[in-house]
Structures are given as C-alpha cells and as structure tokens.
Image: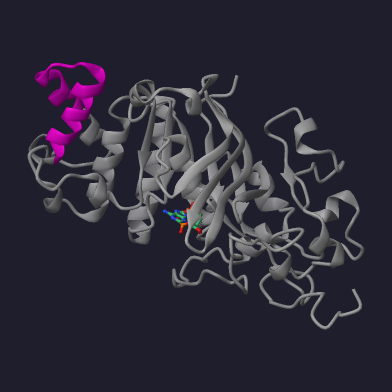
Amino acid sequence: MSLLEVNDLTVKFYTKEGVVTAVDDLSYQIERGEKFGVVGESGAGKSVTALSLMRLIESPGQIESGEILFKGEDLLEMSEEELRTIRGNEIAMIFQDAQTALNPVYTVGEQISEAIRHHLDYSDKEARERTIQLLDRVGIPEAETRYDDYPHEFSGGMQQRAVIAMALSCDPDLLLCDEPTTALDVTIEAQILDEIEQLADEFDTSIQLITHDLGVVAEVCDRVMVMYAGAPVEKAPVEELYYDPKHPYTVGLMSSIPRIGDERERLQTIPGTMPDLVELPSGCSFHPRCPYAEESCTRTEPKLVDPDTGQLEEGVESTTDHVAACHEYTGKLREGLDYSVEIRDAAAGDVEATVANANSPASGQSRMDGDTDD
Ligand SMILES: Nc1ncnc2c1ncn2[C@@H]1O[C@H](COP(=O)(O)OP(=O)(O)OP(=O)(O)O)[C@@H](O)[C@H]1O
C-alpha cells in the first residue's frame, strides 16, 4: 500500500469571476520514504493540492470529489477530530515563509517544545531536551542558548531551519514542503535543501516538495509530477524526466532552469501565461503556448499515457513508470515533437533541454501561427 494515494481529486473555488477549477481530477501516489516533487508555474494548483491533503481548503474553495488515502484511510471521510491527530503529527507542512509559521511572542525553543508536548505527551524537561537536539540537528549552532531566542533574533535561513525542526519534531510520516527555500538566498537554499533531504532519510519521512524550480527537484527528489492548469502533464522518476522529458511543457520548464552564475530572475522563458482556470482552452490546456500544437490538440484533451506504448496511465502497473499527457504518444500529432536534450553536468543537476529547431517551447513560435487552414 502506498503511504499516500490521491485519486481523482478535484478542488474548485467559487469566485465572483466564476468557478475556478484549481485542481482537476488529479491522481498520484507517494511511497514510504519517497521524495516526490510537484513542479509547475504559479497557479498550476500545487499549493491547493498540498492544502487539500491537510484539509485546509477554505471558503470559497471546496474539495469537490476524489479520495485522499493516507495509510489506506480516506482523509476526506475523517472527522475533524481524527484529522487533528494526523495534522502536524503524521503529516507536517513547511511553508515558504518561515515568519508566518513562527509566533513572534514566544521563543523558538518554547514553540517547538509546545508542539512536542502537545503531540507526543512529553514532560517539559523531555520536550526541552528533544527540542535542543532537533535545533542542533537542523544546523542551529549553540542550540541550547538559541533555544531562548525569539524568532526575530534568527536570520531567515535560521528561521526556516527552526520551522523544519518543528515540522520534524513529531516524526511525521509525510512532510509537505511548499516552496520551502524560495525566500532564501541561493547558498542558504542549497544548504536547507540538503538538510531536508538528509533529515528525510534519517527520519524515514516521505516528502512532497512543491516548487516552480526543476533544479530544486533534481537535487532532492526521486520522482516528479509536472502540473499545468490544475492537472498533471507528466510524471516520471527524476532522472528520466531530465534525460528524456516527454511533454513540451516540461521541456519549456527545463529550458528555464537558471544556470549557475545566472541571475535568479531568469524564469518564465515559456512565452504566454497559464490559462484562465475559469474557462480552460479546449482540448489540451497547454495548446495555446505549445509550439507543436496542431488542430487535434485544440479538440481533444490528452490523457496521461505511457509514451512508449500509448497505454493509459490507469493500466500502467508500477508507480515508477513514466507517463505524459500529449497527443504525440497516441499517434494524433501529425508532425510530432522536435527537440533534443543536452546534458551539461548531470551530477550538478545542470541539465538543459536545448531544442533542435526554431519551434522550441521557449521560442514563442507556434505551428498554428498563420496556419489558418487547420
Ligand atoms: N483563496 C482562493 N480564492 C480563489 N481562487 C483561489 C484561491 N486559492 C487558489 N485559487 C486558485 O487556484 C489556482 C491554483 O493556486 P495554487 O496556489 O495551488 O497555485 P500554485 O501552483 O501553488 O502557485 P504558486 O506557486 O503561485 O503558489 C490559482 O491560480 C487560483 O486561481
């Protein structure tokens, strides 16, 4: 049994502008001890997915349908009380902004101790000892003295370390990390990612790591799901995704991984923006931005299939299999995809999809530009 199994999850927000389908019929699994990445641009539905796992979707949002099986039990069927024993205890979450997770009026140590006492029924002394051990373990120097510091006395990186210590304090089975290092500078980011990875191994904790940065996924994750407009477009073991990306959107994201020495801002190299989630484009929702799109892409929505056989994902047995949602793999694309991937330094996660023709996902050119016959 997988640790987590999400089946056909759909989440909608009922806004004045209309009904936003933030997560659309999403399915994935996470195995015990696995580090699972969720990647996509802003608005892809990554955070809404994570919040759904904690059942923290608030009005005007609503989980419409689906199942979230954690150790075989559906979180969506549990009472609020049952859920409280899981939240923060068996499933913990780290957000982008450490400051919002720390209460400014309590010392860092006291907050972590409180979480431990609450969830694990430790005495004050035991909780203090465990907190100091944890602070030390996540790389806070002089943990015993720093125990009594207030959050504002910590740097941004230290605060995020403290939040990680808090999340790990109850030894969760699953740690949801939502852009945990986006607010930090690059050197600190690398250290914290390293720390999360090591701790996950040490504590045998599974991770769902949400990021817009494929470079981060390369560093930490075993398997990855690429999301676009509320739905997965590709799922694969991480090496396969890098060496052999199958979906044009993934190729576009890969072309936008910042290189060492580049300015961090160099993202968004795929021209265009995520579609309006109130009214998705017909057919494949990526087609307006896809250089390979043909008429068939505007008509039918591609399903996740095994790119080698065209077999539907539901029929693929192993969770480690590679699937992509593009008509190329069901024989519906006449001209096919045309890109090649250049590996610069795989060990450093420095992989780039360079594109063989001018029609790259980053070029903004479309086969359908001026192609009015189709
Ligand atoms: N409180 C809300 N009210 C209305 N719509 C919302 C709300 N929260 C999320 N959405 C909708 O859900 C979509 C997906 O949001 P989500 O935060 O999951 O994206 P994301 O992929 O995590 O992006 P980011 O990287 O910016 O956090 C948003 O584009 C928005 O349309």
Which residue is at the far bottom? 370
Depth order, front residue of 263/58: 58
Q: Which residue is at a point 13% across and 48% down the rendered structure image?
A: 104
Q: In the rendering, at what x and y percent does residue 47 appear?
A: 46, 48
Horizontally, residue 176 falls left or right of residue 338, namely: left
In magenta stretch: residue 130: yes
Q: In the rendering, at what x and y percent does residue 95 appear?
A: 35, 47
* Number of numbered callouts drawn: 0
Q: Main secondary structure of the magenta part?
A: helix
Horizontally, residue 131 falls left or right of residue 314, namely: left
Q: Quadrant of residue 118?
A: top left
Horizontally, residue 162 falls left or right of residue 6, namely: left
Q: Which residue is at a point 69% across and 60% down the rendered structure image?
A: 285
Horizontally, residue 275 falls left or right of residue 309, namely: left
Q: In the rendering, at what x and y percent does residue 249 appear?
A: 67, 60
Which residue is at the far front? 16
The quadrant of the rendering that contains the C terminus is bottom right
Q: In the rendering, at what x and y percent does residue 321 appear?
A: 72, 36
In magenta stretch: residue 85: no
**Residue 143 visible in the displayed image:** no
Q: Which residue is at a point 25% across and 45% down the rendered structure image?
A: 101
User: Is 263 above or below relative to 58?
Assistant: below
User: Is 185 above or below relative to 140?
Assistant: below
Depth order, front residue of 7/223: 7
User: Is 45 above or below relative to 272?
Assistant: above
The quadrant of the rendering that contains the N terminus is top right
User: Is 306 above or below relative to 41?
Assistant: above
Depth order, front residue of 111/17: 17
Task: Give the magenta part as a residue range.
Answer: 108-131
**Residue 286 visible in the displayed image:** yes
Q: Which residue is at a point 87% across and 41% down the rendered structure image?
A: 309
